[in-house]
Image (cartoon, coloured by chain):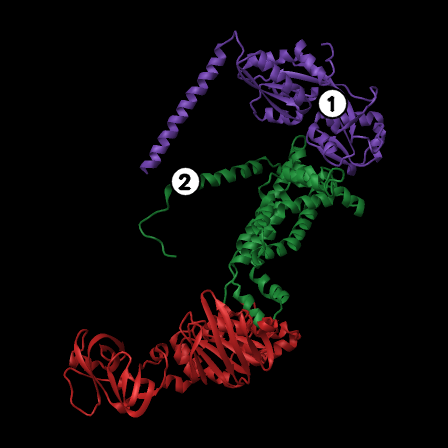
């Protein structure tokens, strides 16, 4: 019993010291207004994985003492997390509808900024063995990988298919939980084709081959970004949002294949 | 008819035993634990393979390493009754007895009919649908016997058939078993460490010690003329060894014995404990054998007491409890032990 | 079992055990609290739910059957037949139990994938079979993760059973197959049932390997766990209804197992 009490006391001391430490650093972050510091978590659409990771490194180098961590997933999944109370500081979505959910729900209170745009493309196995040339070909070539219905790229894909008047049989569609998994079904798996963003095709390099969707059938996906109202580091969150629309940030985004945002 | 020379090694113990038995004969293999009795049984059953020698039953070679012959247990015509019976717990009594027949391809109805007959023979006809767990130890033993015999094997092996029973049941079942064995036409080999079982059930005794046959022969002869300390202790008699000249035997341990019958050469002398009388003073009388010794321990057997006497000739004497009290025969007390020459047996070693 | 007098239950252990029980119960209570009981039946009979349930039942039963056919002999060999490298083989058999399921799915893809796999292309060219994006792929993925449970359980049962019964059966004239069929299997029946039930439950709940290897096609490879995952966002009640169904089935199996099939076989 004595040993147990001693262990409890030790744990209590450790907990107290840790609490002081944590609150100290948090307090420190709040007090300093001149220099950026601290940590933020950016929840961003999966298609932003490569671009944001590079931008995060650049931002941290330009602002020593700051840390930007990322949480990449389908925009719809991120909305669920944030509404469930996940501690994100910034949200970057692949469509307006998901951002609207957070605006309606009160998690976002400032006006979102559109910082990038994207479009869809078909990806096939290198060498295009099934000779796919258009959306119409997808209806009878084999198994097609699309994003799940609630994920932005899934909605966009349905939009493009409907515009083109193409129906793919349900038992030939495999649904991915986010755009990266959707692409992986072609690059690593046995799917014959997938509909993903231009940026994903570029990021995948030689693992897949892109087949263009003509502009008049394609969708124009806009990417809004906004800080989360409950963020504990509003200064750093705002700084990140500003960075995405800054010349440096835009340059990086476009180098990864994102399109310039529409004029606000 | 069994003709076997069993050569096999179990751990550190090499076993080399010649065993023969005729149809209708019961041979008991007697020996202390670790003597190799169970291993011997397993090789006869085919559960263990020989290293050398052979096992032949009714002219059929079952195991002969030199000739590369080895018949698996399921193909041997051998019935085994195991020490703990090993009745299949998930089958009914009837199904247990029918099992050997079904395994040999007999149809279910026919197998059950023959099994019922055998159950009736061992007096359990009305317990056919019961499970082994519902039976008493004695009843299980009878089922195990029926199961071993139902397929009419050429040889029956029994591994300590009465060991799993309490003393009261054992006596009754010993009689029953004897009756059932008598009606079995084949060879019977029984393995036991209990002399009573061997004496009651067997015609011949084979005494096994350290993997080898120490003594064998008809039951009466082995018990009357033991040739090893083990059997002597089992039988409960005093066994001495020495060099005989006419009517005197000089014991290997020193001391002399006077015998009634003349003998020459290396002999055993068997002295039953009840023939030994104890005196506090050196006696005068007709007894030709008088030895001096000290009391070293006593065993109580009902109203009889076995006194261990240590001396030139160390003996066990059997006297009444009253005598012990009268004479004050405690540990350390000096006594004179006497034995009439006519009460002891001498036979060549 | 006699009780030791004068001592109560050990308080610290009871308290910690209580915390553990709360830990396991709270998520279940949370789930039950969110169910909309009025629309439960409609949710469970929606097309997507029906497809998912039908697929789950079919594939998990197939996976269990295959696990039995191949797993029992494997357990027998591991328990009874001496051979070199047995420790390695056993580690291999247990591997799917410790591997993250998604990793298992990727591994299956790299082995049986029609375009990239080690043997996949050959199988496709020779037999015309494709496992990815098909029900057979679901069964394959589920068998991969479930069979180890059956093998381990049955092997343990074979090791602990009294082998003298098999000796006895041999002396009574039974050949090895008869011994196995009429003596060994009945004696290990409890571990057979338990192993099959565990394998079935594991197959039913498999997600990572299925979605990675067999894909996510409604009516063909979208088993209940996959459907729950996808429906959670925009058809939450259907997802909750399916979760409740899985939960009920699992609890029923576990309760039945505990009562009837975990008892010891009494020996005579």
Tag 1 secondary structure: helix
User: Viewed as shown, does residue B322 lie left or right of A36?
Assistant: left
User: Which quarter of the rendered picture does the N terminus of chain A lie within?
Assistant: top left
Quadrant hosting residue B321: bottom left
* Residue B305 point in image, percent of width and height: 25, 79
Instruction: Identify the residue at image location x=72%, y=43%.
Output: C137
Along the line of sight, which residue is nearer the eye, C87 or A2? Answer: C87
Crowd rating for badge 2 (residues with CA inside 10 Å; few <14, some 14–19, many 20+): few
Instruction: Identify the residue at image location x=66%, y=30%.
Output: C233
User: Viewed as shown, does residue B296 lie left or right of A105?
Assistant: left
* Residue C99 point in image, percent of width and height: 60, 40
Question: Color of chain C here?
Answer: green
Residue A215 has which mark?
A: none
Residue A202 has which mark?
A: 1
Along the line of sight, which residue is nearer the eye, B53 or C90? Answer: B53
Instruction: Identify the residue at image location x=25%, y=78%.
Output: B314
* Chain for disc number 2: C
Question: Color of chain B here?
Answer: red
Question: Color of chain A here?
Answer: purple
Is disc 1 in the same subunit as disc 2? no
Image: C108 above or below A137: below
């Amino acid at each position: 019993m004595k040993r147990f009490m001693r262990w409890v006391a030790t744990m209590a001391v450790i907990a107290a010291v840790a609490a002081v430490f944590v609150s100290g650093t948090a307090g420190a972050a709040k007090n300093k207004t001149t220099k950026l510091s601290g940590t933020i978590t950016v929840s961003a659409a999966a298609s932003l994985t490569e671009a944001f990771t590079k931008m995060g490194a650049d931002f941290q180098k330009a602002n020593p003492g700051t840390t930007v961590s990322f949480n990449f997933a389908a925009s719809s999944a991120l909305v669920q997390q944030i509404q469930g109370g996940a501690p994100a500081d910034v949200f970057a979505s692949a469509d307006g509808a998901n951002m609207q959910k957070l605006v309606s729900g009160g998690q976002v209170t400032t006006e979102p900024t559109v910082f990038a745009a994207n479009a869809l493309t078909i990806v096939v196995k290198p060498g295009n063995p099934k000779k796919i040339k258009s959306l119409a070909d997808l209806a009878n070539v084999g198994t097609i990988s699309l994003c799940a219905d609630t994920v932005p790229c899934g909605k966009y894909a349905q939009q493009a298919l409907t515009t083109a008047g193409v129906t793919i049989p349900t038992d030939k569609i495999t649904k991915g939980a986010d755009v990266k998994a959707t692409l992986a079904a072609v690059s690593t798996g046995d799917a014959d084709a997938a509909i993903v963003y231009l940026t994903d095709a570029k990021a995948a390099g030689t693992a897949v081959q892109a087949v263009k969707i003509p502009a008049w059938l394609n969708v124009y996906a806009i990417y809004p970004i906004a800080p989360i109202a409950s963020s504990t580091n509003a200064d750093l969150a705002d700084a990140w949002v500003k960075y995405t629309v800054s010349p440096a940030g835009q340059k990086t985004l476009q180098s990864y294949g994102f399109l310039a945002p529409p004029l606000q | 008819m069994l003709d076997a020379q069993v050569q096999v090694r179990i751990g550190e113990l090499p076993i080399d035993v010649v065993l023969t038995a005729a149809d209708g004969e019961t041979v008991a293999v007697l020996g202390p634990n670790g003597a190799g009795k169970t291993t011997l049984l397993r090789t006869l059953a085919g559960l263990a393979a020989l290293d050398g020698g052979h096992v032949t039953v009714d002219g059929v070679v079952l195991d002969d390493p030199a000739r590369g012959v080895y018949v698996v247990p399921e193909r041997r015509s051998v019935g085994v009754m195991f020490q703990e019976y090993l009745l299949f717990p998930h089958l009914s009594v009837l199904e247990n007895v029918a099992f050997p027949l079904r395994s040999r391809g007999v149809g279910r109805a026919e197998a059950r009919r023959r099994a019922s007959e055998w159950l009736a023979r061992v007096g359990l006809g009305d317990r056919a649908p019961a499970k082994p767990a519902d039976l008493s130890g004695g009843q299980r033993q009878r089922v195990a016997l029926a199961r071993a015999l139902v397929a009419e094997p050429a040889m029956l092996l029994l591994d300590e058939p009465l060991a799993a029973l309490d003393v009261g049941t054992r006596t009754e079942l010993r009689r029953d078993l004897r009756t059932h064995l008598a009606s079995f036409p084949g060879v019977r080999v029984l393995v036991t460490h209990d002399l009573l079982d061997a004496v009651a059930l067997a015609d011949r005794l084979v005494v096994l010690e350290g993997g080898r046959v120490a003594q064998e022969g008809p039951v009466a002869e082995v018990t009357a003329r033991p040739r090893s300390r083990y059997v002597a202790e089992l039988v409960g008699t005093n066994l001495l060894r020495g060099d005989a000249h006419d009517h005197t035997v000089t014991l290997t341990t020193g001391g002399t014995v006077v015998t009634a019958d003349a003998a020459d050469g290396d002999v055993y002398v068997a002295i039953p404990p009840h023939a030994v009388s104890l005196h506090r003073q050196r006696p005068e009388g007709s007894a030709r054998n008088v030895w001096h010794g000290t009391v070293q321990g006593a065993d109580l057997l009902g109203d009889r007491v076995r006194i261990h006497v240590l001396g030139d000739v160390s003996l066990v004497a059997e006297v009444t409890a009253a005598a012990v009290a009268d004479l004050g025969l405690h540990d350390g007390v000096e006594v004179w032990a006497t034995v009439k020459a006519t009460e002891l047996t001498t036979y060549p070693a | 079992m006699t009780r030791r007098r004068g001592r109560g239950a050990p308080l610290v252990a009871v308290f910690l055990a209580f915390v553990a029980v709360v830990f396991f119960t709270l998520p279940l209570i949370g789930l039950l609290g969110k169910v909309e009981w009025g629309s439960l039946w409609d949710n469970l009979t929606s097309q997507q739910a029906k497809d998912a349930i039908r697929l789950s039942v079919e594939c998990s039963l197939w996976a269990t059957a295959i696990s039995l056919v191949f797993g029992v002999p494997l357990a027998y060999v591991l328990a009874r037949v001496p051979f070199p490298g047995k420790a390695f083989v056993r580690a291999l058999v247990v591997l799917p139990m410790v591997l993250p399921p998604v990793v298992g799915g990727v591994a299956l893809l790299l082995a049986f994938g029609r375009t990239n796999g080690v043997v996949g292309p050959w199988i496709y060219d020779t037999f015309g079979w494709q496992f990815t994006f098909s029900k057979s792929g679901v069964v394959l993925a589920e068998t991969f993760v479930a069979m180890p449970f059956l093998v381990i359980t049955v092997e343990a049962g074979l090791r602990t059973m009294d082998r003298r019964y098999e000796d006895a059966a041999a002396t009574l004239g039974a050949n090895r197959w008869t011994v196995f069929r009429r003596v060994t299997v009945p004696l290990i029946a409890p571990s057979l049932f338990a192993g099959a039930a565990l394998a079935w439950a594991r197959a039913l709940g498999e997600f990572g390997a299925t979605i990675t290897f067999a894909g996510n096609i409604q009516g063909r490879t979208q088993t209940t766990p996959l459907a729950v995952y996808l429906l959670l966002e925009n058809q939450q009640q259907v997802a909750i209804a399916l979760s409740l169904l899985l939960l009920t089935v699992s609890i029923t199996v576990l309760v039945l197992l505990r009562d009837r099939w975990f008892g010891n076989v009494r020996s005579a």
